[in-house]
Image (cartoon, rainbow, N blue to C red):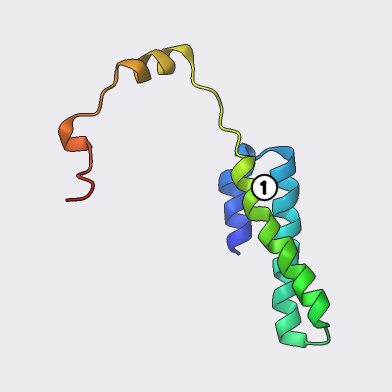
Amino acid sequence: MECQQFWVENGLYLSARAREAFKISCWAAFQQNRTFRQGGFTTEQIEENLRRIEQAGPAIEEGVELPPLSEKEFLKSLTDVPSKRDTPNVGT
Protein backbone atom coordinates (compact mmCIF):
# COMPACT_ATOMS: atom_id res chain seq x y z
CA MET A 1 0.00 0.00 0.00
CA GLU A 2 1.39 3.40 -1.00
CA CYS A 3 0.39 5.04 2.30
CA GLN A 4 2.44 2.56 4.27
CA GLN A 5 5.47 3.01 2.04
CA PHE A 6 5.27 6.80 2.36
CA TRP A 7 4.98 6.47 6.14
CA VAL A 8 8.02 4.18 6.38
CA GLU A 9 10.16 6.46 4.22
CA ASN A 10 8.96 9.89 5.45
CA GLY A 11 7.06 9.65 8.73
CA LEU A 12 10.13 10.55 10.74
CA TYR A 13 10.38 13.93 9.01
CA LEU A 14 6.78 15.05 9.61
CA SER A 15 5.61 17.35 12.38
CA ALA A 16 3.04 16.00 14.83
CA ARG A 17 0.26 17.88 12.98
CA ALA A 18 1.38 16.50 9.61
CA ARG A 19 1.61 12.95 10.99
CA GLU A 20 -1.93 13.18 12.34
CA ALA A 21 -3.25 14.58 9.05
CA PHE A 22 -1.48 11.82 7.16
CA LYS A 23 -2.99 9.10 9.36
CA ILE A 24 -6.46 10.57 8.94
CA SER A 25 -6.05 10.80 5.17
CA CYS A 26 -4.83 7.19 4.93
CA TRP A 27 -7.86 5.97 6.82
CA ALA A 28 -10.12 8.15 4.66
CA ALA A 29 -8.50 6.76 1.49
CA PHE A 30 -9.16 3.23 2.74
CA GLN A 31 -12.79 4.16 3.44
CA GLN A 32 -13.13 5.82 0.04
CA ASN A 33 -11.94 2.66 -1.67
CA ARG A 34 -14.44 0.61 0.34
CA THR A 35 -17.17 3.13 -0.49
CA PHE A 36 -16.80 2.54 -4.20
CA ARG A 37 -16.73 -1.23 -3.79
CA GLN A 38 -19.64 -1.61 -1.35
CA GLY A 39 -21.75 1.50 -1.88
CA GLY A 40 -24.26 2.71 0.69
CA PHE A 41 -22.69 6.10 1.41
CA THR A 42 -24.34 9.45 0.85
CA THR A 43 -22.88 12.13 -1.38
CA GLU A 44 -22.19 14.23 1.73
CA GLN A 45 -20.27 11.39 3.38
CA ILE A 46 -18.17 10.85 0.27
CA GLU A 47 -17.42 14.58 -0.05
CA GLU A 48 -16.43 14.85 3.62
CA ASN A 49 -14.15 11.86 3.23
CA LEU A 50 -12.50 13.44 0.19
CA ARG A 51 -11.92 16.64 2.19
CA ARG A 52 -10.07 14.60 4.83
CA ILE A 53 -7.81 13.18 2.14
CA GLU A 54 -7.15 16.56 0.54
CA GLN A 55 -6.35 18.27 3.86
CA ALA A 56 -3.29 16.08 4.35
CA GLY A 57 -1.39 17.67 1.44
CA PRO A 58 -1.04 21.19 2.86
CA ALA A 59 -0.43 19.84 6.38
CA ILE A 60 2.43 17.67 5.08
CA GLU A 61 3.91 20.47 2.97
CA GLU A 62 3.89 22.82 5.97
CA GLY A 63 4.95 20.18 8.47
CA VAL A 64 8.10 18.70 7.00
CA GLU A 65 10.80 18.87 9.63
CA LEU A 66 14.20 18.03 8.26
CA PRO A 67 17.07 17.66 10.68
CA PRO A 68 19.27 20.76 10.86
CA LEU A 69 22.61 20.85 9.11
CA SER A 70 25.66 20.26 11.24
CA GLU A 71 28.09 23.16 11.48
CA LYS A 72 30.43 21.38 9.05
CA GLU A 73 27.60 20.85 6.52
CA PHE A 74 26.48 24.45 6.86
CA LEU A 75 29.98 25.85 6.29
CA LYS A 76 30.45 23.54 3.30
CA SER A 77 27.18 24.75 1.79
CA LEU A 78 28.47 28.33 1.93
CA THR A 79 31.55 27.46 -0.12
CA ASP A 80 29.96 25.05 -2.59
CA VAL A 81 29.18 26.95 -5.74
CA PRO A 82 27.58 24.93 -8.52
CA SER A 83 29.62 24.73 -11.68
CA LYS A 84 28.20 25.92 -14.98
CA ARG A 85 27.63 22.32 -16.07
CA ASP A 86 25.54 21.68 -12.90
CA THR A 87 23.27 24.65 -13.63
CA PRO A 88 20.35 23.88 -15.97
CA ASN A 89 19.85 26.09 -19.00
CA VAL A 90 16.46 27.59 -18.26
CA GLY A 91 14.58 29.01 -21.21
CA THR A 92 16.89 27.63 -23.90
Residue at image coords 29%, 21%: 80
Extreme residue toward the front, this view: 91
Q: Residue 17 location in percent, x, y? A: 74, 42
Q: Residues within 10 Å of mark 1 (few under 14, many from 20)?
A: some
Q: Residue 30 location in percent, x, y? A: 72, 69
Picture quadrant where residue 5 is located:
bottom right
Up-down relation of residue 51 to residue 84 (above or below): below
The count of marks equals 1
Up-down relation of residue 51 to residue 41 (above or below): above
Please give the residue where the numbered disc 1 appears in the rendered image: 59
Q: Give left or right: position of 80 versus 48.
A: left
Q: Amino acid at mark 1?
A: Ala
SS at mark 1 in the image: helix
Residue at image coords 54%, 23%: 68
Q: Give left or right: position of 26 versus 78.
A: right
Picture quadrant where residue 31 is located:
bottom right
In this view, the residue in front, 1 or 56, is 56
Residue at image coords 76%, 57%: 24
In this view, the residue in front, 16 or 51, is 51
Q: Residue 75 location in percent, x, y? A: 39, 13
Q: Give left or right: position of 57 versus 87.
A: right
Up-down relation of residue 65 to residue 46 (above or below): above
Up-down relation of residue 39 to residue 82 (above or below): below
In this view, the residue in front, 4 or 77, is 77
Residue at image coords 60%, 64%: 1
